[in-house]
């Protein structure tokens, strides 16, 4: 729904006098951006890897805060390994 509103807004803005040079209607389906949405330019301010890492950290802190736990004392396990079926005498 949000993307649809953005496309509609690009379409509406494209009809406004003085904004025709931006060709927003032509690029409404890309939300007004021309070219590829995920730039790979070396001059881009950051990398998508860095953005993902920051987002992961922010989400972990947010979940810890909502659970009422100190985020500095929380660790996230991101790797699991199957150790066997369990339930035997070795448990």
Image (cartoon, rainbow, N blue to C red):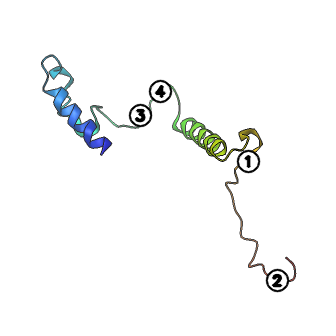
The residue at 48%/28% (across/down) is 42
Tell me which label, 2 or 4, sits earlier in the chain: 4
As drawn, the residue found furthest toward the bottom would be 88
Disc 1 or disc 3, which is closer to the eye?
1
Mark-to-mark CA distance, 1 and 3: 32 Å
Find residue 25 and report its horizontal and vertical position in percent. 17, 32
Tell me which label, 1 or 3, sits earlier in the chain: 3
Mark-to-mark CA distance, 3 and 2: 53 Å
30 over 86 or under it: above or below:
above
Find residue 91 and report its horizontal and vertical position in percent. 85, 76
Mark-to-mark CA distance, 1 and 4: 31 Å
11 over 85 or under it: above or below:
above
Q: Which residue is mark 3?
A: 39
Tell me which label, 4 or 3, sits earlier in the chain: 3
Q: Quadrant of residue 34?
A: top left
Q: Examine the rendering and report whether any part of residue 27 can be seen.
A: no
Mark 4 near mark 3, Cβ–Cβ under 8 Å?
Answer: yes
Image disc number at residue 44: 4
Image disc number at residue 88: 2
The residue at 62%/46% (across/down) is 63
Residue nearest the observer in this picture, 75 or 69: 69
**SS at badge 4:** loop
């Amino acid at each position: 729904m949000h993307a649809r509103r953005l496309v509609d807004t690009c379409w509406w803005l494209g009809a406004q006098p003085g904004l025709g040079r931006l060709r927003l209607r032509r690029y409404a389906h890309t939300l007004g951006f021309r070219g590829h949405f995920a730039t790979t330019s070396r001059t881009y301010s950051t990398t998508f890897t860095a953005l993902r890492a920051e987002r992961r950290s922010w989400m972990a802190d947010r979940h810890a805060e909502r659970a009422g736990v100190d985020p500095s004392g929380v660790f996230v396990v991101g790797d699991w390994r199957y150790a066997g079926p369990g339930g035997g005498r070795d448990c």
